[in-house]
Amino acid sequence: MSESRIQISPVTPVVGAEIGGVDLSELDDATYSSLHEAFLDHGVLFFRDQDISIEAQKALGARFGELLAHPNDPGAEGHPEVMVIHADESSKRVAGELWHSDVSCDPVPPMGSILRLHTVPDIGGDTLFASMYAAYDALSERMKALLDGLTAVHDGGPYYREVNRIIGRDDAGRSYPSAVHPVIRIHPGTGRKALFVNRMFTQQILGLPARESDGVLALLFDHIQRPDFQCRFRWRKDSIAFWDNRCTQHHAIWDYWPETRSGYRVTIRGEPPV
Ligand code: SIN
């Protein structure tokens, strides 16, 4: 087997690494193994100068698992499993402008997402990523004990229907995924514990009265925003970010209106959280 020559430069001690020395349109087995290891170690990988086609991006995602169509997005023409991420002067909203883990409302939420931007604003449009391992580790032992074994409802309906209302998409008669997941999940690849609730989809912690559930979720949503759990990615044309939805959350910043920011995302099937 050939030797992989990727360069790994961590962005912060807890999350994110820039990867050099790789062409993502041609991934040999040794490079795939090194990337997979780096992905588990850093939670999100960043790549520069990857002018790859939609087909190559799909092939890249498929190396890591089955590709998923989005429950509320029609996908790129001819590629239902490719989500178009696009904002310009006519946009009323942008994708991902809240801390979240992609489609956590699905009973089997995605393991990862790969986003490539081919058009970026001159300045702005960064994405924030946060480590949910770091967020879990920083909780007090008392709070960890309270959350241990609790489950929460993740519902796609409220968020996706609000998106559709803003952009004027008719969703009458549509239904959206909803699932119950552990509040603390164990990552299948690392065995580490990660906080698994997010502002976009998590509605209620089961087993607590509504008032307590609301209070605990508000505390956790605030907690995960701590700057020391985060890194911030500054995009350039043909940058790619590949993030692990099982142990990170992300937040896209819309500070570049009326400029255009555009690209494609593929989403990779995960496993039921435990
Ligand atoms: C998303 O997939 O949530 C959007 C991320 C981004 O546009 O930076």
Image (cartoon, rainbow, N blue to C red):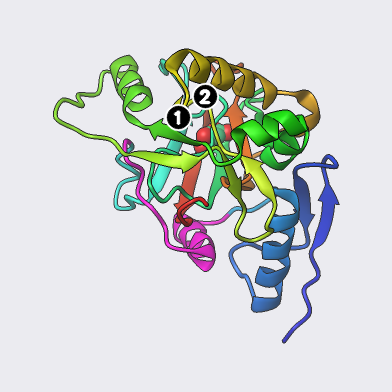
Q: Quadrant of the N terminus?
A: bottom right
Residue drawn at (67%, 57%), measured in percent from left and top?
Answer: 191
Which one is earlier in the sequence, the residue at label 2 or at label 1? 2
Task: Find residue 55 and report its image quarter.
Answer: bottom left
Q: Which mark is residue 199?
A: 2
- Cα separation, mark 2 vs mark 1, equals 19 Å
Q: Specify the quadrant of the image occupied by residue 135.
A: top right
**Which structural element holds mark 2?**
loop
Left or right, 198 with reference to 227: left
Q: Give the crowd class for mark 2: few <14, some 14-19, many >=20 residues within 10 Å.
A: some
Q: Residue at x 19, y 33 (%)?
A: 174
Between 234 and 199, the one lying in front of the other is: 199
Above-or-below relation of 58 to 266: below
Ligand 1 found in image quarter: top right
Range of magenta residues: 52-72
Can you give x and y, in whole percent of width and height, for residue 21 in the image?
78, 62
- Spot occupied by residue 35 in the image (x, y as percentages of width and height): 70, 63
User: Which mark's residue is nearer the viewer, 2 or 1?
Assistant: 1
Quick one: SS at disc 1? loop
Q: Mark 2 CB in 8 Å range of ligand 1?
A: no
Residue at 66% x, 28% y is 126
Percent x, y for residue 73?
33, 37
Spot occupied by residue 49 in the image (x, y as percentages of width and height): 68, 50
Residue 253 visible in this rendered orientation of the protein: no
Q: Which mark is residue 207?
A: 1
